[in-house]
């Protein structure tokens, strides 16, 4: 057993080293073509392939690395965005966010509790993760609900599985439907659960899609705070600590610096582009760590009913968002 585990860790380390090597080749003149194949979907696929065939090599490291590196990547992406352009292009999506958050929570409650007969906490956690921003929302709302570790694991596993699918599925559907960069960015930000997959799907679709998707998604993530407070009131869980996603405010600060400071000179623009490019590489390696966290044990722990609730709720928000985009 120990020999097999050591063998798996060696493979894991080799994959990480390989990805880092090709990502860094991008900084060497003439080597860009060799690094172009290392995209967010490819990194996620490699992580998934490893986890499902070899298991989790470094589960604690994966969890911490994916959490913090994602936050750093999102902040870094702010240095590639103009505040005025982002707000203007994302205004429509932000308005729909208010309706979609409330609607998703209500539909999720109906599907989970009334149709699937899933326990209250698990159903509510899945709904919250779908409505706001995936794992971050679950991590914030879970303590307010006093949810058990098993309930948190099932909800996180459900959201994680659907996130992995979304990163591959959404760009393909967007191209098949001929969606514009703006429409796809809005759709991805609202219909995909986790920030990592939203950013990854946006980056795969195009620059404009990435900018719009990131802006709307992070605005949506701010709803963690009011939803957690409302949850505390509804379920009478007073005195519970609410996890505030501070990295969102640093993202806004980065966008402000890029707009009003770096954007005023050629040197500043070059600095902003360099930080933004490095952040994209961090995002790519982060998606490998996220994929490597999805083992067969996680799949087994989810179960059919919670996964079905997640799929039905995901389908509802995806189709309703598409309808809103095309009819508005």
Image (cartoon, helix red, strand yellow):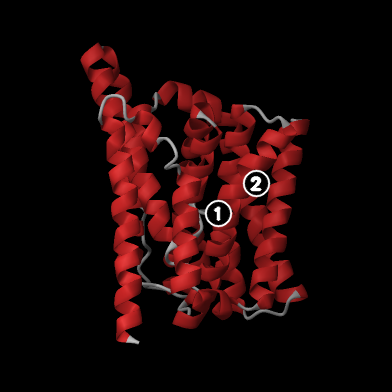
Please name whichever residue, 36 or 267, is drawn nearer the observer in this view of the structure: 36
Query: Which image quadrant is residue 185 in?
Result: top right
* Secondary element at tag 2: helix
Residue shown at 26% from the left, 31% from the top: 27
Q: Residue furthest bottom?
A: 1
Q: Foreground: 224 or 186? A: 186
Q: Position of residue 298 (x, y in %)?
A: 51, 75
Residue 149: x and y in percent read: 44, 81
Secondary structure at badge 1 equals loop
Specify few, some or many for label 1: CA neighbours under 10 Å numbering under 14, 14-19, or 20 or more.
Answer: many
- Image-based side of 139 in relation to 181, left or right: left
Q: Measured from the top left, where is residue 204 in percent x and y?
A: 52, 37
Q: Choose the circle earlier in sequence order: 1 or 2.
A: 2
Image quadrant in which you'd find residue 25: top left
* Most foreground residue, 241 or 111: 111
Residue pictured at 60% horizontal, 55% vertical = 165
Residue at 76% over, 39% down: 323
Query: How far separated are the C-alphas under marks 1 and 2?
Result: 16 Å
Pointers 1 and 2 in contact (CB under 8 A)?
no
* Residue 58 in sight: no
Checking the image for residue 99, the label placed there is 2
Q: Is residue 92 left or right of residue 261?
A: right
Give the residue at the far top of this rendering: 265
- Mark 2 surroundings within 10 Å by alpha-carbon count, few (fewer than 14), some (14 through 19), many (20 or more): few
Rendered location of residue 123, percent (x, y): 62, 72
Mark closer to the observer (1, 2) = 1
Q: Say above or below: 165 vs 39.
A: below
Q: Which residue shows up at 53% across the image and 42% down it? A: 201
- The residue labelled by disc 1 is 193
Q: Quadrant of the C terminus?
A: top right
Farthest-out residue, left: 267
Decide if residue 56 is on the left or right side of residue 153: left
């Amino acid at each position: 057993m120990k020999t097999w585990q050591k063998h798996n860790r060696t493979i894991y380390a080799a994959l990480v080293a390989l990805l880092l090597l090709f990502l860094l080749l991008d900084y060497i003149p003439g080597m860009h073509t060799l690094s172009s194949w290392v995209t967010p979907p490819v990194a996620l696929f490699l992580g998934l392939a490893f986890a499902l065939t070899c298991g989790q090599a470094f589960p604690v490291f994966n969890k911490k690395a994916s959490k913090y590196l994602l936050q750093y990547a999102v902040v870094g992406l702010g240095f590639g965005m103009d505040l005025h352009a982002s707000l203007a292009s994302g205004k429509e999506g932000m308005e729909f966010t208010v309706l979609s958050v409330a609607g998703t929570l209500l539909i999720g409650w109906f599907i989970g509790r009334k149709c699937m007969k899933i326990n209250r906490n698990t159903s509510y956690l899945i709904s919250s993760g779908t409505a706001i921003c995936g794992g971050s929302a679950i991590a914030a709302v879970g303590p307010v609900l006093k949810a058990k570790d098993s309930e948190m694991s099932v909800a996180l596993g459900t959201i994680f599985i659907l996130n992995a699918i979304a990163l591959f599925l959404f760009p393909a559907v967007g191209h098949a439907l001929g969606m514009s960069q703006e429409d796809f960015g809005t759709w991805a930000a609202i219909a995909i659960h986790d920030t990592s997959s939203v950013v990854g799907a946006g980056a795969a679709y195009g620059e404009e899609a990435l900018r719009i998707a990131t802006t709307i998604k992070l605005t949506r993530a701010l709803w963690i705070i009011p939803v957690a407070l409302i949850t505390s009131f509804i379920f009478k869980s007073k005195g519970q600590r609410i996890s505030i996603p501070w990295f969102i405010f640093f993202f806004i600060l980065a966008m402000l610096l890029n707009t009003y400071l770096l954007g005023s000179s050629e040197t500043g623009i070059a600095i902003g582009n360099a930080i933004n490019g490095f952040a994209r590489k961090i995002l790519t390696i982060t998606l490998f760590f996220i994929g490597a966290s999805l083992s067969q044990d996680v799949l087994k722990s989810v179960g059919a009913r919670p996964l079905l609730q997640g799929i039905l709720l995901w389908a509802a928000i995806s189709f309703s968002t598409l309808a809103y985009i095309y009819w508005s």
